[in-house]
Amino acid sequence: MAELEITTMSSKGQIVIPLEMRKGFSEGEKFIMIKAGKQLILKSVEDFEENIQEDIAFARKTEEAWKRYEKGIFKSMPVDSFLKELEKC
């Protein structure tokens, strides 16, 4: 199951990866960052080729859901239910 967290970019462009999401990664590990419009996708260099199209589709669906949230068009639900709803789109 995917995990969702909110983080903030600093004035220097730094983004903190929340502690729970860092589990399984080690210091010095290299990542690839992909920018598609206003979406950023972070992938481990080792896993870059795996599921890249699915990652982009998931990012697109998440961005669309966030836009609906900002407009007040949303309903509250647990994360696992939210992810199931995203899969339907």
Image (cartoon, rainbow, N blue to C red):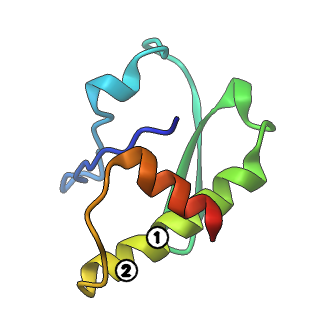
Query: Mark on residue 63?
Result: 1
Residue farthest toward the bottom in the current orientation of the protein: 71
Query: Residue 48 shows which numbered tag?
Result: none
Q: Position of residue 21 (x, y in %)?
A: 38, 28
Residue tagged 2: 67
Q: Residue at x 25, y 48 (%)?
A: 7
Secondary structure under the numbered disc 1 in the rendered image: helix
Q: Is residue 57 left or right of residue 75?
A: right
Left or right of 66 on screen, residue 36: right
Residue 8 vs residue 86, the one in the foreground? 86
Q: Residues within 10 Å of mark 2 (few under 14, many from 20)?
A: few
Q: In percent of the image, x 30 and y 84: which residue is there?
A: 73
Q: Secondary structure at mark 2?
A: helix
Taking the spot 20% from the left edge, 52% from the top edge, the residue there is 10
Q: Is residue 30 left or right of residue 56?
A: left
Disc 1 packing (10 Å; few <14; some 14–19; many ≥20): some
Residue occupying the far left of the picture: 11
Residue located farthest toward the right when viewing the structure as drawn: 49
Dividing the picture into quarters, in which one does residue 56 lie?
bottom right
Question: Contact, CB < 8 Å: mark 2 with mark 1?
Answer: yes
Question: Quick one: 29 or 5, which is closer to the camera?
Answer: 5
Give how far across and how far down residue 88 sits, in percent: 63, 65
- When the figure is inspected, residue 1 is found, relative to residue 62, above or below; the finding is above
Quarter containing the C terminus = bottom right
Near-viewer residue (59 or 8): 59
Distance (Cα) linking label 2 and label 1: 6 Å
Task: Give the amino acid type for the residue marked by disc 1 in the picture.
Answer: Glu
Position of residue 85 in the picture relative to residue 17 (left or right): right
Residue at position x 42%, y 13% in the image: 27
Question: Which image quadrant is residue 23 in?
Answer: top left
Residue type (three-letter) at the residue carrying disc 2: Lys
